[in-house]
Image: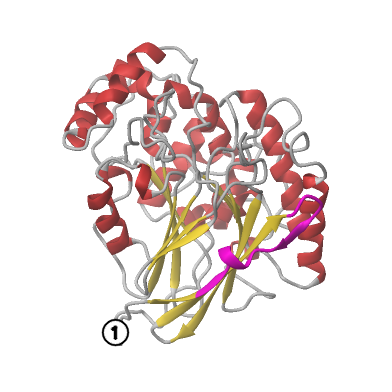
Amino acid sequence: MFWPQRRTVDNDEYREKDVNNTGMIRILQFSDIHWTISSPWEEQFTGLRSAFKNEIENLRKANKKVDYLFICGDIAFKGINDEYTQAMEYIDKLCRLLELKRKDVFVVPGNHDLNRKSDGHELRELINIALATDDRNEDFLKTVHKDKSLNKTLYAAFQDYNMFAKEYLCHDEVMNKCLSRAEDVVIADTDKMFYDHNLKDIGDITVTLTGVNTALNCDGWDYNDAKGKGHKQMLAKRAYYKSELKKQELRILMGHHPLEFLASKDRIREDLDNIYQLQFFGHVHDQMLQGDEKTVRILSGAFDPPKDKFNPDKYKPVYNLVEITQDTEKSVRVECTARIWNKTSFDFFKKGSFVRKINIERDLNPWSKDMGQEESIDVRAIKFKYMELENRTDYFNMIDGVVFFPNKDKTENDNCLDFLMKLESTGKLQELAKIMR
């Protein structure tokens, strides 16, 4: 995996502008593409790829500008580098058709995104048994993270996925540290097991996206909902929890496994529903909606579902177009248009489509916002431009008040990502944007 060569971008690119979709966010969302080295999709669903291209072209003809691409896990099939290379090439093609950039793409790992044959899989199976228990998983995970060798063993299967995810800045701090070659890496209690990004605002409502890893302890004995057997997946509180919740904020969560597949699902459901008003999941092969006026959960279905030997037409490829607009002063409107494969093309999927309203808590304090504050910036655009520079290491010592020493045991990419993390934590990203050429 590599970052493209430097390109010239005007600083105005950092400003959050939306000419076509004022007051709206439009998301193209799908899951479970299961990209394999052999020909994907076409063997089971002849013509699917060209039909999907037609769908995207029709969106453009209808002036429905897509803002973001969400892929809810299972990008690969065996979790190996060659699969991610081909998947990335396909995603780049989609971006060109959608007039998007990599900064507009968000991914999370699924159960097919880890290499189960990677080093240490025997020990990892033992770790998984403990991680999947309902009552002690938080304590056990803390123990694992204190041991460097256990850390590397636990995350080793995600090596290729992590390289892929970093191309979209969709990696989490803990996984990235565990997979680092540096010898002096320490997992701090403050390191996140999820990633967090701001999307563009809807009116005066801030929109954020959090990506979580529900596949940490996946193996050959994962829970099968049809059979009711297997161990549940681990999602530690540290992997999704936010202690500070702002008003006038729509918080979106994206993960792979729906709640039914998680250990301690009732506790996790209560936590997630108190934090995230809109939740996207993949994994299941039937598209469906869950939730209430406080929370909406979209179970997306699969773009490459398995074939049921008893009923070949049971599962069909499906994708969603989700539009989010400000409905009233205290709510947003979420409209999901589902499209399902009908053997030759995609059709409107009435069962999977819906319109829902989500209430947003307001900040009624007139002094809560500084009326003279500088216009918000697109943090991801700054990060992506920096990572594309040829001379990016020259900037390590150019920001006043920031001292950054690269780690000789880390790759240049990882050192640059650490540098960005330090700038973000110290509020210096805007200064980087001003001096980049």
Coordinates of residue 428 in the picture (x, y in percent): 43, 54
Residue 34 to residue 334: above or below: above
Instruction: Pick the quarter of the image with the N terminus.
Output: top right
The residue that disc 1 covers is: 367
Q: Residue furthest front?
A: 310
Read off the magenta span. Answer: 342-355
Instruction: Please tell me which residue lies in front, 80 or 303.
Output: 303
Residue 367 to residue 279: above or below: below
Residue beneath the point at 36% across and 37% down: 228
Coordinates of residue 51 in the picture (x, y in percent): 81, 52
| Left or right of residue 230: residue 311 | right
Instruction: Please tell me which residue lies in front, 374 or 81.
Output: 81
Residue beneath the point at 37% across and 70% down: 292
Kindly state the secondary structure of the residue where label 1 is placed. loop
Residue 416 visible in the current orientation: yes
Residue 346 part of the magenta-drawn span: yes
Residue 137 part of the magenta-drawn span: no
Colour mode?
A: secondary structure
Q: Amino acid at mark 1?
A: Trp
Q: Find residue 6 and report its image quarter.
A: top right
Q: Residues within 10 Å of mark 1 (few under 14, many from 20)?
A: few
Coordinates of residue 193 in the picture (x, y in percent): 35, 40
Residue 1 visible in the current orientation: no
- Label tally: 1
Coordinates of residue 16 in the picture (x, y in percent): 57, 68
Instruction: Please tell me which residue lies in front, 67 or 181.
Output: 67
| Left or right of residue 213: residue 307 | right
Residue beneath the point at 68% across and 36% down: 87
Instruction: Please tell me which residue lies in front, 407 or 203.
Output: 203
